[in-house]
Amino acid sequence: MKQISEWIRRIGDGGLDAALGEVYGKGAVPTQRDRYLRALEEFGRLFGTEREVTLFSAPGRTEIGGNHTDHNHGRVLAASVNLDVIAVAAPSSENRVRVKSEGYPMDTVTLDDLAPREAEYGRSSALIRGMAERFVQDGLSIGGFDAYTTSNVLKGSGLSSSAAFEVLIGTTFNHLFNRGSVDAVTIAQMAQYAENQHFGKPSGLMDQTASSVGGIITIDFADPGKPLIRPVAFDFTSTGYRLCIVDTGGNHADLTPEYAAVPAEMKAVAASLGVPVLRETSWEAFLAALPSLRKEHGDRAVLRAMHFLQENERVARQVQALESGDFPRFLQLILDSGHSSFEYLQNVYPVSSPGEQGLSLALCLAQSVLEGRGAWRVHGGGFAGTTQNFVPDALLEPFRRTMEAVFGPGSCHVLAIRPYGGIGLETL
């Protein structure tokens, strides 16, 4: 830890440029240098300029393959991206955590009562309390700290801003009070607990793992207590394609029932097949029971189960395509995944608001620009938010113009894969 003045001097002298270049890419160093300087100054204004502080970062993530597979113990392909939430944090002598996030009121969580509070559902304070409780449950140390955070992870974008915040809080507890001894997968599991039990959202484990571990990874959740995580060696920068996330302006805030219905319906089908999750059944067993499953659960639940069974196998083929360098095959599998999500999983627009179909519109526009030369699909949980697109360099500007003419300036985000998950910048 260093005093704020020392950090400001070091950043101003370029002493953090190498670390910032590793995390964000060399071209982003000046922007990130200014961003961290502003965060340090704001922390000093809020909590005192003489404090010794540490800098933390946790990235958003992009789901490349495995749309709504993790909660039924399936496979996913995901990567951390170069959008993140950062924190300037310092331990305090008070038995409380105070977090001031840019643009939001201060969250204050006392550490003498860590039980879930229904009144906090959906609030950042719930995630702080949940992470603290899980550290205690695991026999780890916690303590009070003050933090100022700022984020460029688009909220409600499918880039998992909540998972990034959870991982950031876990990384802070880990480095301030546990000497960095807690591994990235454990922090991800803690984050899922906080989101499920305290925040009130029944998320799977993919978002938190991708944010916490970092890089391109494939995860097999057959045993969610011990997920198999493997890095995927592939350089997207060598393909001549850019990863573009299009923000259609929709928000996930009021769509929790839509999200919750997906795992609930899948698990109901699984229960009728005599297993707790769809990963534990087979396509053959599913087809044999299909007539009775339709009668018991309806066609939407059956179609969502079909999506899972096919998408889970598709992830393995996507990984194989990347590792063998067959990028055209990978793009076709992305398109196949997108069709399955739209047609079978049915998470492109909410049935509660059929007039709001920004994602459908974005997918149609992407097809008009990219057909035969790229790939497009719904991104993340769906129902609102963003699409994911693999755009050849030659079509990047036409693609961007088309999207921003409809969804507004700045709605098309050209991202890069980040090699790090949740980190303290002093460790680089």
Image (cartoon, rainbow, N blue to C red):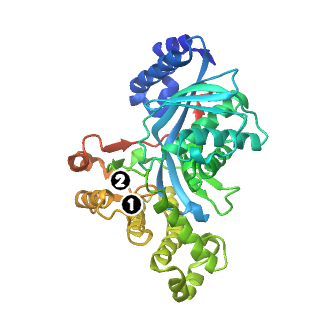
Evaluate whether residue 240 shows in this view: no
Measured as percent of width and height from the top left, residue 311 is found at 50, 68
Q: Earlier in the sequence, mark 1 or mark 2?
A: 1
Q: Quadrant of residue 95?
A: top right
Please state which amino acid type lies under the numbered disc 2. Phe
Q: Is residue 94 above or below residue 256?
A: above
Quadrant of image for the N terminus: top right
How packed is label 2: few (under 14 Cα within 10 Å), some, or many (20 or more)?
A: many
Q: Tell me the quadrant of the picture where the C terminus can be found.
A: top right
- Residue farthest along the right direction in this orientation: 139
Disc 2 element: strand
Q: Is residue 190 visible?
A: yes
Quadrant of the rendered image containing residue 355: bottom left
Specify the amino acid type for callout 1.
Answer: Leu
Residue 17 in the figure: left or right of residue 191: left
Q: Secondary structure at mark 1?
A: helix
Q: Badge 1 is on which residue? A: 331
Frontmost residue, 419 versus 124:
124
Residue drawn at x 60%, y 83% as measured from the top left:
285
The residue at 42%/69% (across/down) is: 340
Q: Vertical placement of 96 versus 167: above or below?
A: above
Location of residue 338 in the rendering, given as x and y in whole percent from the top left corner: 39, 64
Marking on residue 390: 2
Residue at figure coordinates x 57%, y 88% from the top left: 288
Residue 33 locus on image (x, y percent): 44, 22
Residue 271 relative to residue 346: left or right: right
Check the image and report above or below for 194 versus 285.
above
